[in-house]
Amino acid sequence: MTDRFGSKAASVRFDSVTKAFGEVVAVNKVDFEIEAGKLVTLLGPSGCGKTTTLRMIAGLEMATSGRILIGERDVTLLPATERDVSMVFQSYALFPHMTVIENVAYGFTVTGHKKAEAHEKARAGLDLVGLAGYDDRLPSELSGGQQQRIAVARALVLEPEVLLFDEPLSNLDAKLRRRVREEIREIQQNLGLTCVYVTHDQEEALAVSDKIIVMRNAEIAQEGTPRELYEQPSDLFVADFIGDANIVEATIQSVAGEVATVSVGGNDLTLPSRGMPPGPVNVAIRPDTVLISEPDSPGDLEGQVTKAAYLGDHLEYTVSTAVGDLFVIDHTVKNPRPVGTKVSVKFSDRIALVPASS
């Protein structure tokens, strides 16, 4: 962090951590490491274990087995009050009867700090999130985005080693979500904070993260940078969960080094082999890499538009082809193609091979 809030960012490590609620295993032998000063997102569908994992970092849930380390300190058995962690909740959890300054200063006042000192820290936090001068307002007088920033300021002023976010933007509308996530990312980078961020929103995860940990059925499906997960998914679940993907059966005809010749609907493409041998395979085709044009183009797949939607800066189509229905995003909005239009379909080379057995 900056000198204003000290410099305490710490790493987080899970060593074979399991959490069970009776017979139900919520997190199963999970291993990962989060570097100090990085923002890492736990991403996955409801019930996958991501929120339980976050709560174990906070000390709100205790691990059934395994070790949790914050920095070099083993915190596995420590309660939340003995961990240097702050959390921003989905509900914001602001006190409605307290002013903004009282809400932000709350963590200091309950630990015995003098009011003047607590309010000085709180004003520095409000300035950091762009809400200087809002001291005397009540939460009910603020917008949803402002309330979220108050919650962030309240967590920041405690100068935690790790800052946790539990679905922090789910109560905001789409435009506000984008703006607030940019503000959170900017604060995190400027202060060098270690942040662990839980969301089920793939776009949000791609936008804010240094690394994403995708969870499925209480385990880690894949971890990596946003680009790695989007362009090199390890299996069909990750390919379909990280952004929209058309999953199509294909065949690797031959492999030469790191390059494969792949047949997709009778058309040959040259793609990175990702270590896969000749034989059946799946390909993950992103909607914006499906190119449609006038029908009867030589070598292209034949298709027909079965659904069409105008979304302002792009058009979305469903196109029926010999390899299945393809979801297509087309940024050429001047000449929309109505339902029933016959088209030719081809693919760009930004296609990922995915094992057929996954």
Image (cartoon, rainbow, N blue to C red):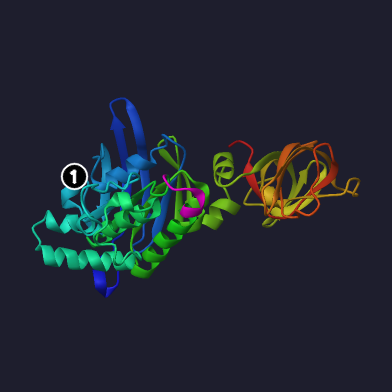
In terms of depth relative to the viewer, which is nearer, 146 or 75?
Answer: 146
In terms of depth relative to the viewer, which is nearer, 131 or 77?
Answer: 131
In terms of depth relative to the viewer, which is nearer, 31 or 167?
Answer: 167
Q: Does residue 188 appear left or right of residue 122 in this picture?
A: right
The location of residue 211, given as percent across then percent down, is 45, 56
Query: Is 248 in the magenta?
Result: no
Q: Does residue 312 appear left or right of residue 253 in this picture?
A: left
Q: Is residue 209 visible?
A: no
**Which quadrant is the C terminus positioned in?**
top right
Q: Which residue is mark 1?
A: 77
Check disc 1 and give the amino acid type: Leu
Magenta-tinted stretch: 171-176
The location of residue 37, given as percent across then percent down, is 35, 64
* SS for dot 1: loop
Which residue is situated farthest in the bottom direction here?
Answer: 3
Residue at x 79%, y 48% (from the top left corner): 336
Query: Is 175 in the magenta?
Result: yes
